[in-house]
Amino acid sequence: MQARVYVGLDLGSSVCHQVIVDANGGLIRSKPFKTTKDNLVKAFDGLGSEVEVHIESGELSSWVGSLIQPIVNRLVVSHAKTLSWTARDSVKSDKADAGKLAELLRINRVHELCYSDDERRKCSKQLVVHYQELTRSQAKAKCKLKARLRLPGVIRKDSRVFSQDGRKEILLSIENQSTKRMIEQLCSVLDHLPETQTQAKRLMIDAAKDFKQVKLLQSGP
């Protein structure tokens, strides 16, 4: 098979679904397979050299991209927010999503993301995302703590609730023991997050030190 083909690959942690169409949009193949390294490579056997692949960005996209990019002609990774056809369509299935990815690539209606082949950059990006997620987790934990305090009528808008002294004062005012233990558990979770966040920040900064773009940004006012 030497004619150009367009492949939509819907990625899942357990199962992937592949849909292949020709230049006219005719279906060549549609099949699911278990998500493994060998299966991902075998899925492209015999398709020839004119193979274009479209996948959606996500946790698996970097790994899958590194496996199939060397064996296909073109790999396109699109951001999920730009794929309104797949995200908002009431008809949702792995097969349908894979078919839409293939069709969007065939008619060249894609918003391609830039993925670096440099493993250091990939790792650095992952560390940035990791730090951001921990920061969000800390903010959510603080909001949840104040929400739980409102259950026994403790309404606090200040930050003393996050300090050890302020927390002790508040816990003494709660009579229900089950509610008090629930809030103490939330406090325990919150106490561990700042140090973890600090460690993640150090990892992120250390990984970025060697990039000239970072040094250039740091030279600005």
Image (tube, rainbow, N blue to C red):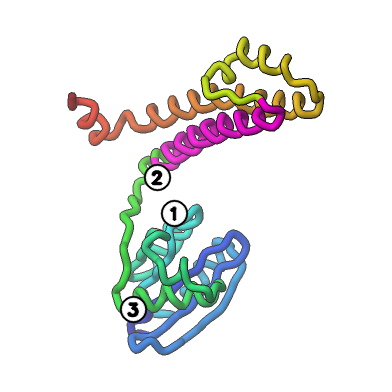
Closer to the chain start, of discs 3 and 2, is 3
Which-is-in-front pick, marks 3 and 2?
3
Q: Position of residue 164 (x, y in %)?
A: 62, 13
Give how far apart the Cα atoms at labels 2 and 1 are: 8 Å
Name the residue: 62% across, 62% down: 14
User: What amino acid type is highlighted by mark number 1?
Assistant: Ser
Give how far apart the Cα atoms at labels 3 and 2 are: 28 Å
Residue 122: which disc?
Answer: 2
Q: Is residue 85 above or below residue 116?
A: below
Q: Secondary structure at mark 1?
A: helix
Q: Position of residue 160 (x, y in %)?
A: 55, 16
Q: Is residue 110 above or below residue 125?
A: below
For the residues bearing labels 2 and 1, Cβ distance under 8 angstroms: yes
Residue 106: which disc?
Answer: 3
Taking the image as shown, residue 157 lies to the left or right of residue 77, namely right
Name the residue: 49% across, 38% down: 133
Q: Is residue 108 above or below residue 155?
A: below
Closer to the chain start, of discs 2 and 1, is 1
Q: Residues within 10 Å of mark 2 (few under 14, many from 20)?
A: few
Closer to the chain start, of discs 3 and 1, is 1
| Residue 162 seen in the figure | yes
Name the residue carrying label 1: 62
For the residues bearing labels 3 and 2, Cβ distance under 8 angstroms: no
* Residue range (magenta): 125-153
